[in-house]
Amino acid sequence: MAIGWSKDGAVQEQIDATIESGVELARSRLPKGESRTHCEECEEEIPEARRIAIPGVRMCIACQSELEKEQKALTLFNRSGSKDSQLK
């Protein structure tokens, strides 16, 4: 059942697009290449166990945690689901 001028299945398409966007964002944040021995932010040594567990790691745990907090703050608002984006 369509609501307003939306075609049937539009809601599911929006959900699928949001999921695909989230997966793409997560994949883009995965480390690539060879692990660093020292953090690129604070120059602290990255433990060998972390380098083995996460191939391509570039930051120590403290710096990575801070980066993820900042990234999470930027992605809390879902623009694709806002009324303003649907009116255009």
Image (cartoon, rainbow, N blue to C red):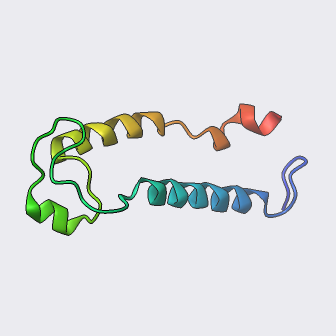
Residue placed farthest to the right in the image? Answer: 5
Residue at point 26%, 56% (across, down)? 57
Residue at point 48%, 39% (across, down)? 75
Residue placed farthest to the bottom in the image? Answer: 52
Q: Is residue 48 left or right of residue 24?
A: left
Residue at point 46%, 60% (across, down)? 27
In the image, residue 13 sits, relative to residue 78, either above or below, namely: below
Q: Residue 41's quadrant in the figure?
A: top left
Whole-percent x and y of residue 7? 87, 58
Q: Quadrant of the N terminus?
A: bottom right
Q: Is residue 33 left or right of residue 3?
A: left
Q: Quadrant of the C terminus?
A: top right
Say which of 28 and 56 sits in front.
56
Whole-percent x and y of residue 21? 59, 55
The number of callouts visible is 0
Say which of 86 and 39 sits in front.
39
Residue at point 17%, 47% (across, down)? 61
Q: Residue 30's quadrant in the figure?
A: bottom left
Residue placed farthest to the top in the image? Answer: 84
